[in-house]
């Protein structure tokens, strides 16, 4: 069954409509890659699912329950965790404190500070360091670990490879692969690297100017189909909403 | 020896100013709100202690914990019902809101208690002092106030650094949106920070009422001292408020030693001197760190 159902969601930032009537459902245990150009509305869509933006209209259902009106911290309790774009660590807190700050806020489960340090060994020597003094890759690992502390049923990853060195991206995806392959976690990730997005995901959805214009199984779509949708060259038939 | 006396009195006075200032600093550090009603909340707290102790016939020291809890609750409500709404409208609106709140408190107290000044009876402690030698005596009440200030600042620092709620409060201070995304109820944290600030300023107001007299309009002058202590010590730093309070207190008592009328002027001059030395820059740490 689908864990997340988005129904004709519309989100505005002031006068700008960032997400226009998007409908999407994500099955439990699946990995969905969300692709699209800058400004297509991917980040806004993820943030609306996490509760950081209130939609103008439409519904967000999680595990059958309507969560559209719930504030972000209540959604964390239900098991929705977002790794925000730009990592957004608490700069004055240490790595350990960044992780601890998220402890006990979400569901109970296997993720603890110790478990996160085991999954991301590069963080082990850094626990007492302030987050602001870390490299990009270290910060990203901390940000993912912080989201995992909620033991999420749905993990939202927003451009986790942005600004990282290629080796750091590889190391991070190795850690994430183990997580996603376990099939226990449902993941939506926004990823600019199309090859990577197609490799790690079961389904791909492409956004253009706030609309969802292409959605399908990653292995059924060709690179060209996605690229065309990405740039809005040849519009694929609109996904039924 | 009179100068040693003056410096000693100034250091102890600095403890009182730190008590006034730490809540102001906390609210700015966590929410970016400059609370112009801070001095008036201190006076309101002193009146509450006065009412509790005179109606039950108990010492103000016994009435104080009750008043701190009640005022803390009032602070939480004030944040959730009033300041939270004004924060949504931008950084300037909370300033206006607290300014209005200050006027409401002043006039409310005038209505209820007239403009007569009152003081809180600290019993034998009011006049008790430690005789170091023939020329140097230290007022015991001042020592008590200073020790309470030390304990409170230390306790607050431990609370912020070591407890889960303190950590959540620091996280919220640094990035309230992201705090929400990891499951922290940012509005609740704001409410708690205001509760702590109003609770601590109730202690400050009560000690102020024991040292001297207070009236419904005493708040604004205490607010200025608290401001000066915060700015001298560095905004958002808890121990900084103690340093700032002591610098201000010593400046005032030395000023009073030179000429009794120049006490407050001397404090203000030192404050201006600090601003000039720093070339107008104020140390700001929104992060509530030590």
Image: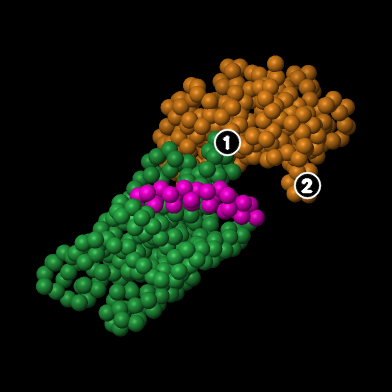
Chain colours: A orange, B green
Helix, strand or loop at label 2? It is: strand
Q: Magenta segment, which residues?
A: B64-89
Mark 2, residue position: A16
Q: Give the prevailing secondary structure in the magenta stretch.
A: helix
Depicted B209 relative to depicted B163: above or below: below
When asked about the image quadrant of residue A118, the answer is: top left
The front one of A229 and B50 is B50
Instruction: Check the picture and name the quadrant holding the N terminus of chain B.
Output: bottom left
Chain name for mark 1: A
Mark 1, residue position: A73
The label nearer to you, 1 versus 2, is 1
Helix, strand or loop at label 1? It is: helix
Q: Residue at x 29, y 62 (%)?
A: B121
Q: Residue at x 43, y 38 (%)?
A: B164
The front one of A135 and B223 is B223
Residue B65 within the magenta-colored segment of the rendering:
yes
Observer able to see residue B148: no
Callout 2: few (<14), some (14-19), or many (20+) C-alpha neighbours within 10 Å?
Answer: few
Q: Residue at x 77, y 37 (%)?
A: A57
């Amino acid at each position: 069954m689908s864990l997340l159902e988005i129904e004709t969601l519309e989100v505005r930032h002031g006068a700008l409509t960032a997400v226009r009537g998007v409908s999407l459902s994500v099955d439990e245990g699946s990995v969905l890659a969300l692709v699209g150009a800058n400004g297509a509305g991917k980040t806004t869509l993820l943030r609306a699912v996490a509760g950081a933006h209130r939609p103008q209209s439409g519904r967000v259902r999680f595990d059958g329950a309507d969560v559209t009106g719930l504030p972000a911290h209540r959604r964390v309790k239900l098991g929705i965790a977002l790794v925000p774009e730009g990592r957004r660590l608490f700069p004055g807190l240490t790595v350990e404190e960044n992780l601890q700050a998220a402890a006990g806020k979400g569901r109970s489960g296997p993720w603890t500070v110790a478990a996160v340090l085991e999954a991301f060994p590069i963080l082990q020597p850094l626990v007492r360091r302030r987050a602001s003094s870390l490299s990009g890759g270290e910060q990203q690992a901390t940000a993912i670990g912080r989201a995992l502390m909620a033991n999420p049923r749905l993990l939202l990853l927003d451009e986790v490879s942005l600004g990282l060195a290629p080796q750091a991206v590889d190391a991070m995806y190795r850690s994430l692969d183990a997580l996603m392959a376990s099939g226990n976690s449902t993941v939506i990730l926004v990823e600019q690297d199309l090859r990577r997005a197609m490799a790690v995901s079961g389904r791909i959805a492409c956004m253009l100017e706030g609309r969802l214009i292409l959605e399908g199984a990653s292995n059924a779509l060709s690179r060209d189909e996605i690229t065309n949708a990405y740039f809005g060259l040849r519009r694929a038939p609109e996904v039924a909403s | 020896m009179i100068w040693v006396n003056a410096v000693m009195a100034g250091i102890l006075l600095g403890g009182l100013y730190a008590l006034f200032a730490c809540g102001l600093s906390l609210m700015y550090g966590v929410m970016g709100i400059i609370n112009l009603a801070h001095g008036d909340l201190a006076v309101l707290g002193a009146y509450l202690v006065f009412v509790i102790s005179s109606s039950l016939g108990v010492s103000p020291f016994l009435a104080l914990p009750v008043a701190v809890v009640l005022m803390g609750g009032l602070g939480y409500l004030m944040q959730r019902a009033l300041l939270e709404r004004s924060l949504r409208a931008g950084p300037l609106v909370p300033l206006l809101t607290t300014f209005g709140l200050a006027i409401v408190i002043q006039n409310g107290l005038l209505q209820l208690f007239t403009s007569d000044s009152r003081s809180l009876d600290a019993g034998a402690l009011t006049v008790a002092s430690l005789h170091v030698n023939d020329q140097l005596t230290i007022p015991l009440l001042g020592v008590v106030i200073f020790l309470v200030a030390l304990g409170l600042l230390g306790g607050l620092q431990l609370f912020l650094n070591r407890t889960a709620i303190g950590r959540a409060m620091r996280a919220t201070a640094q990035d309230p949106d992201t705090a929400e995304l990891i499951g922290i109820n940012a509005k609740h944290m704001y409410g708690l920070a205001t509760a702590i600030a109003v609770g601590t300023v109730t202690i400050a107001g009560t000690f102020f009422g024991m040292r001297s007299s207070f009236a419904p309009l005493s708040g604004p002058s205490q607010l200025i001292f608290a401001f000066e202590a915060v700015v001298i010590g560095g905004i958002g730093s808890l121990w900084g408020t103690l340093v700032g309070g002591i610098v201000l207190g010593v400046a005032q008592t030395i000023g009073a030693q030179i000429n009794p009328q120049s006490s407050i002027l001397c404090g203000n001059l030192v404050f201006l001197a600090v601003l000039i030395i720093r070339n107008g820059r104020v140390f700001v740490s929104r992060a509530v760190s030590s």
